[in-house]
Image (cartoon, rainbow, N blue to C red):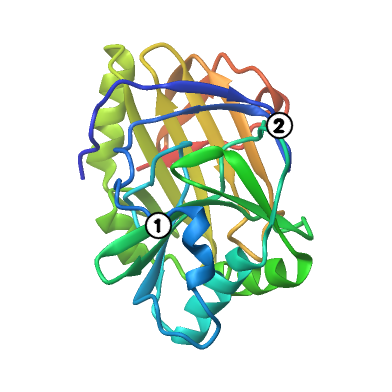
Amino acid sequence: MKRDKATIAVAVVAFAFVMAGCTFSLKQPASNNVVPHELKQQYQPGDTLAEQVTVSRSLQFGTVNSDVYGILKQSDEIMLVIEALQGANKIEGMLDVRTPDYDIIIEHEGSQRAVHLWLDPVMKTSMYTEVSDTGTGYTISSADTEKLKEIIFGITYGVELAVKNGDVVNALAKWHNVDVWEEFLGNVKSKTADEIHVTSYTIEGGAIFQDLIFDGQNIAYTFDSTHDAYENQMKQLSFCSGIATNKTDEGKKYTLSGFSGKEAEQPTFSMRIP
């Protein structure tokens, strides 16, 4: 699946939860039809006010990733999400934080409420902002954070959905959307802005994500194993200047070159495609 090409914005943010870094955007802005934070108290426990909650992995402040990670439709899960947002406490002052972990869309009667969610496996509390107001944050209690972890970390991001989203997928050495990878390589070579998302699956079925976002000069690379319960869970952002290709007996091996940051010391990216 071909990704939209657009002007890439770079936002430098200090990390309040896990890491520091920059983020690039190729996604379209969220719908303007968003329920403002002031109306959140209209969501009352026991009320059926939302038809579903859509979850995606966040890539950029102020926009929603259109590639769906999972959809919550059970009323108890929907209400847990709503109640977690209701019970959050406003953080005084302007925020200075890293890229969010998730985009959450709460849908009700044709309207949408869009929030960014910071939810890390090792942190006891979490945080959210409205997508329409990323300067104002709200801390979610440890009890509600545990409930959110159970729900969101319990979502299964299957191979079929990953392929549909246009990810380059490595499902136990069975590759999908290799043409997307080849297109990305061509765009890096021609200095054309592009992004690509590589999803690899473990034997247990856990998904490990590697996001490469190219701004025409450099690649922002994120390694994310926080969705795999059996992996050393980490989310790490680095920057590099290119992609190296080496031919081997098993196929072409791709590595990233010109790194700064932790990736230069502990490489996490390596692809070998037959």
Tell which circle, 2 or 1, labels the residue nearer the N-terminal end: 1
Numbered tag placed on residue 78 in the rendering: none
Kindly tell me whether residue 247 is visible in this rendering. no
Q: Amino acid at mark 1?
A: Val
Mark 2–mark 1 Cα distance, whole angstroms, equals 43 Å
Q: Is residue 167 something that shows in the picture?
A: yes
In the rendered image, which quarter contains the C terminus? top left
- Where residue 45 sits, quadrant-wise, is bottom right
Would you say 267 lies left or right of 204 here? right
Out of 80 and 164, give the one closest to the viewer: 80
Residue corresponding to mark 1: 35
- Name the spot of residue 122 as percent of width and height, x first: 77, 56
Task: From the top left corner, tell me how far across and down residue 102 is, in percent.
Answer: 51, 52
Occupied quadrant, residue 100 = top right
Q: Are marks 2 and 1 in contact (CB under 8 Å)?
A: no
Provide residue 108's location: percent of width, then percent of height: 33, 70
Tally of marks? 2
**Left or right: residue 64 compared with residue 232:** left
- Residue 169 image position (x, y, % from top left): 37, 52
Q: Which numbered disc, 2 or 1, marks the residue closer to the eye?
A: 1
Q: Residue, x 48% and y 77% (percent of image)? A: 78
Quadrant occupied by the N terminus: top left
Q: Amino acid at mark 2?
A: Gln
Badge 1: residue crowd in 10 Å (few <14, some 14–19, many ≥20)? some
Label drawn at residue 266: 2
